[in-house]
Image (cartoon, rainbow, N blue to C red):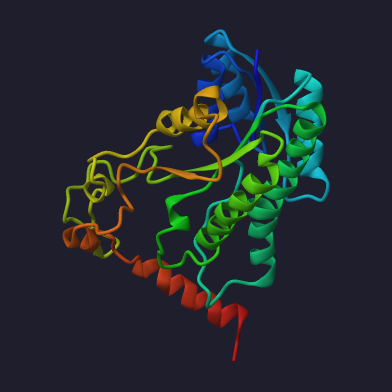
Amino acid sequence: MKKVLVSGGSSGIGRGIALYMAQQGWEVTFTYHSHAGGAEETRGMIESSGGTCHVLEAHLEQEGAPEAMVRQAIQLMGGLDAYVCNAGRDGRHSILSTTRSELQSILDTNYLGYMLSAGEAARHMVRRGVKGSIVFITSTRARSAHPDDFLYGGIKAAVERSAESMALDLSRYGIRVNCVAPGATRVRDFQHQNVKPGDLVNGRPYWPIEDTIPLGRMGQPRDVAQAVHYLCGDDSSYVTGTVLRVDGGLVLPGMPEWWAPCQWLNEAWRDRAMEKMDQDFPE
């Protein structure tokens, strides 16, 4: 039985990946940060479907934690064939109001945590002669600029660029490194389910996000999980250093112009950023 570590499996995309990998016959260790109840729900879903899993609490922003997480997973499973680095913090940040501590917090989790844990996984694979796979979950926001996204989107872009060099470094050992970049993915219910297109919400027109996606629907965690499973398995043995977008065509070059007006700038967020700027960075 092949063995995979999935970081951040208590909900959303990470839960979908852990569940699908278990359903495909992999032994799974997944981690959670603080949502212990969600982690137990994921465990229950995996075990009720006949899968095998282990659960670890991990705080990737803490020094030494990324490496310890990988070592614990290897000890629990007796080895490691694939590592899926999914855990991270989302957020919107204005360059006008972001502080050093906020920058460092996102950097520690979304970049340093990724690189340090991937390094530990790679060392295990090299020393044991495992021709394994490392998959980073990034985002279409790494390639498509949005307002208030210089930090999260910028770090995801850095992960993708780092993965390319890692793929070259590790290719001599038969270890493959790739990224999966989800687009808009439904991981929770939206609060505006009964609002019609064009209705005003918080002073601006509402538009269903599905109408901004060429394939006409949002992604599901399973869509991302299937791409991850492909990149972890033998069917992708000749694939490394690539980014597989799972976005329904959302960020295709040359998108028709009529899609653009659907991407409304959130003026309420802009106003909050200005207030925060005046508070944290007074003249």
Q: Which of 76 and 273 is in front in this view?
A: 76
Residue 254 in picture, x, y percent from top left: 25, 59
Q: Is any atom of residue 16 visible in this view?
A: no
| Farthest-out residue, bottom | 283
Q: Residue at x 55, y 29 (%)?
A: 237
Q: Is any atom of residue 182 visible in this view?
A: yes
The N terminus is located in which quarter?
top right
Q: Residue at x 26, y 47 (%)?
A: 213
Q: Toward which corner of the image does residue 44 lie, by quadrant? A: top right
Residue 78 in picture, x, y percent from top left: 79, 19
Q: Which of 90 and 142 is in front in this view?
A: 142
Residue 128 in picture, x, y percent from top left: 80, 27
Residue 116 in picture, x, y percent from top left: 75, 47
Say left or right for 246 vs 195: right
Say left or right for 93 vs 173: left
The C terminus is located in which quarter?
bottom right
Q: Residue at x 50, y 77 (%)?
A: 275
